[in-house]
Amino acid sequence: MHFDFIDLRLLAAVLETGSITAGAERVGLSLAAASARMRGLEQQAGVTLLTRNPRGVQATPAGERLLHHARVLLQQRERLRGDLAEFAPGQRSRLRIVANTVAADAFLPELLADFLVLHPHTDIVLEELPSPTIAQAIAEQAADIGIVADHADLRGLTSYPFRQDRLVLALPPGHALSGRRTLSFADALPFEFIGLPEESALQQHLEQLAIRSGGPMRLRARAAHFDAICRMVLRGAGLAVVPEESAQRHPQIRHSALTLTDEWATRRLSIAVRDLAQLPLPAQRLVAFLRQA
């Protein structure tokens, strides 16, 4: 059997996204080319690797086995490329970082940009996922580095403290809640909110908490990033639950934001890796950089 790395990357992308279309987009192939490669992969393996259904695709037992080996080989290739970059200045390495909503939006952009400036031959792919899914991705070697909240199961992984994530309630100017210093999330639910997109891990978490607290959240609008949400709050469109880090960037919100009294509103974020010594050298450097930042 002959599998090239494009086939293996495609297989991993298709099974991680649950869709040939999304997998093709992730690896930069047309749908037709991706479908042809998947058929060729199955023909070479002599077994069915995917089961197709109206909701997407899933791995067969043979597909799961091949996916495991694909991830090992892909990680080893990145480790080799990273190690050789020491001796070949033109050699590039690519790291896949998976992070929860707050880390991906509020903490990582500037840090990763600074790292890229220092390391011009390293590229980074940053993806947002829920913390439990991140822990699974790191354990299965589907990503190099994860940034997770403390409710994720990190057994079998190596973790390092990263940041404290405190969520606050951003208020429009002159709102009825202005003047208060603290509030529970349940007491804010009678008011209207600006939220994140439906697929956001944090937004899903907040909407589940709202239901448990007698919700649901009454959403006036959704915006892709915390900065856009804060700007809409400042225009009076609604309340928003945002990281304190994001609120600090808007003076009016910073001065009026309420501390949420719920225990879940304060979380510790950790850097998670499977085995630091086995990571590509650029990934080891990034872990060290994030720990020192």
Image (spheres, rainbow, N blue to C red):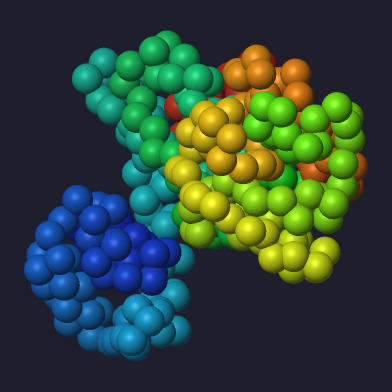
Query: Residue 31's x, y, as percent?
Result: 15, 66
- Quick one: 79 or 140, which is closer to the camera? 140
| Residue 215, placed above or below residue 275 | below
Q: Tell me the residue at 29%/62% (across/down).
A: 23
Please indicate whether residue 6 sits to the left or right of residue 247 in the image.
left
- Quick one: 18 or 101, which is closer to the camera? 101
Please indicate whether residue 29 sits to the left or right of residue 60 in the image.
left
Please indicate whether residue 86 sits to the left or right of residue 249 in the image.
left
Q: Tell me the residue at 20%/73% (across/down).
A: 38
Q: Tell me the residue at 35%/35% (across/down).
A: 94
Query: Residue 143's x, y, as percent?
Result: 48, 48
Q: Quadrant of the N terminus?
A: bottom left
- Quick one: 202 or 217, which is closer to the camera? 217
Q: Tell me the residue at 67%/27% (across/down).
A: 173
The quarter holding residue 289 reads top right
Q: Quadrant of the C terminus?
A: top right
The quarter holding residue 247 reads top right
Residue 156 appears anywhere in the view: no
| Residue 26, placed above or below residue 175 | below
Residue 7 appears anywhere in the view: yes
| Residue 202, placed above or below residue 229 | below
Query: Residue 193's x, y, as percent?
Result: 63, 48
> How many numbered marks are there?
0
The quarter holding residue 153 reads bottom right
Please indicate whether residue 195 sits to the left or right of residue 153 in the image.
left
Query: Residue 116's x, y, as percent?
Result: 40, 19
- Quick one: 283 or 196, which is closer to the camera? 196
